[in-house]
Image (cartoon, helix red, strand yellow):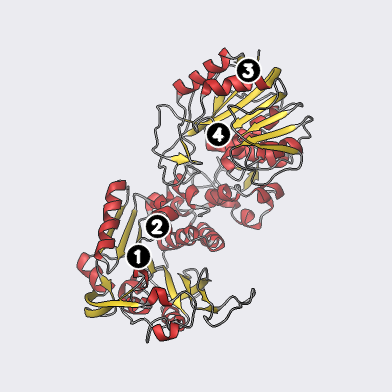
Amino acid sequence: MSFFLSSLKQSGHLDKIHMTICIVGSRKIVNEDDYARKGWHLFAPNLTILGFDADEEACNLANAEIEARKVNWAESHIPLALWNTVGKQTLYVTKYPGYSSLYPPNESYMQRFNGYIDLIQLERTLEVKTTTLDTYCQAEEINEIDFIHLDVQGGELSVLEGASEILKQSILAVYSEVEFTDIYVNQPLFGDLDVYLRNQSFTLFDLIVSTGRAVRTTSPITSPNRPGSLVWADAFYLRDLIRPNLNTHLQTPERILKLACIADVMDYTDYALELLEYLTLNYGNDPNYNFADNIIESLAQVPELVKQGLENLPIVNRLRDYISSNNIYFGHAQTQIKGHKNRKPRGRANFVNKSEIATSSKPSVCKFLKFRDEIYKCTDYLHRNGYVSHNLVCKDWDIAHIIFDLSDGNLLDMGSSDSYILKNAVLKNVRGEKYGIDLQPPDVPLEEVKYMIGDLMDTKLPDHYFTNITCLSVIEHEVDFKKFATEVSRLLTEAGKLYVTFDYWTPKLKPDFKLYDKLWNLLDENDAKNLIEECKSCGLNLVEPVDWSLGDAVIKPGYFSPPGANISYTFGMLVFQKN
């Protein structure tokens, strides 16, 4: 999962670049083969995906799916077999189509390993036309490809040899399947591909071994430490465009930014950060390449770093001169720069404490999340007061407001599988018994809490037993408001409180989407008023008038909106008291 991209998307930096991905062997077998689901969709609409596969039917299916999804990027799958020559080759079709190759399967050798012979057994051969990626790019006037993924069963080096010009001209990263033993007859192995790419100035970043080991068929035992021979892996190569004494046309700030984005989306966070810092320190006078605020904002999502103080991080000190005056964590001492009266100076950053959600006055609790910086303040409040943050940091807005107000007495958390409210109630030393109810067991159970698997609209718990009931982002998932209000009223003591939060936007959003195997019914103003009326009819009254005003749709694609939902919304909060 990317670390910086959502911030770069929000700040508009991604709008200034276009990312082109090439997938050679683009047959989609599982969801993970869909690059849009891996985070690349954040570049849309400035995203082009080119897929190549020798299987025409697989390409037709992929193109039909893209058309049906009405995606907001350009994606096409071309039924071509890429190679290092233009001509004809024999395609060896295996029992499992995913192992078909332009190299013949090495059946006599691979039968020595469990599970392989049923996959690579040759079923038939057919003649296919081949071309090179360079030839295709020249014909289609494609001048840049930024990232290439290769999965062509032993033919990866041949494809790269046929892409030598576009590789030299623009490609910044290569993700390739590699083999360490001869699955196919006379195929190139990892060492051959590694030499080729290193000669093209790529650096090996990682070898990812998932299921790429094999155990001998004759052996009834295997070692837990060495579970079989290494057969294949995925190799990831990146360019190093900030290496000293580098002489290449690729060393431009735009391409370094693309490289940082690729590193981030592929989960090489440290390299992405190094590149973003390099751009800021070397090109940061141009706002297009000043990423100080993005870096600070992203680091602030790590509770451990916030707890120790972002201002104590060496990287923050190095970036002081580039932090903007409206940064939520740090402000600038604005000073006049001689000779530049109309210019806003960067100055030196002064660190500002913006952590409290409340100082002398109690925060309002019947309202909507309006701006993202409210979340940061709530996260900071939690950490500075010894509480824990939600694994979805955006939910710190809910937790901070509730934990600030929560009083002693028996507590029931409805939808308790993550236990963050309950954990913080324990940390606050809230006196009274603590219960949690959910349709599934808790992720990390607390010994201080009694957990139940059950229906929050029919809990079977005793009458008038709880002083506080919390229900965070549950009622939008197939909860009947009337039954919910009736059950809560039965459970609460006199003057007991109900804290409810929910996903919200007006006008009404209707995503065809499920969360937790439940329909996702985001509330709008009419829904929220219906909930208020149902609660009122059961003796549950709002503790204050609702502030119905809205700000930003804070939760959006790239910032905690569920992948694939493609909607933007915010959070709402209501607090009721019984009679």
Q: Residues within 10 Å of mark 4 (few under 14, many from 20)?
A: many
Relative height, residue 81 to residue 542 (above, below): below
User: Which residue has dot 2 on it?
Assistant: 35
Q: Which mark is residue 473?
A: 4
Between 121 and 309, the residue placed more toward the observer is: 121
What element does badge 2 sit on? helix
Compare marks 3 and 1 and give the one earlier in the sequence. Answer: 1
Compare marks 2 and 4 and give the one earlier in the sequence. Answer: 2
163 with respect to 188 (left or right) = left
Query: What's the residue type where badge 4 is placed?
Result: Ser
Residue 334 visible in the snapshot: no
User: Which residue has dot 3 on it?
Assistant: 543
What element does badge 4 sit on? loop
What element does badge 1 sit on? strand
Between 285 and 388, the residue placed more toward the observer is: 388
- Residue 514 location, x and y as percent? 45, 40
- Residue 461 location, x and y as percent? 68, 27
Residue lying at 66% horizontally and 16% vertically, measured from the top left: 578
Relative height, residue 377 to residue 51 (above, below): above
User: Which residue has dot 1 on it?
Assistant: 23
Q: CA distance from mark 3 to mark 4?
A: 20 Å
Query: What's the residue type where badge 2 is placed?
Result: Tyr
Residue 365 visible in the snapshot: yes
- Residue 31 location, x and y as percent? 41, 56
Question: Do the numbered discs 1 and 2 sit on residues whose CB atoms are within 8 Å?
Answer: yes
Q: CA distance from mark 1 to mark 2?
A: 9 Å
Compare marks 1 and 2 and give the one earlier in the sequence. Answer: 1
Compare marks 3 and 2 and give the one earlier in the sequence. Answer: 2
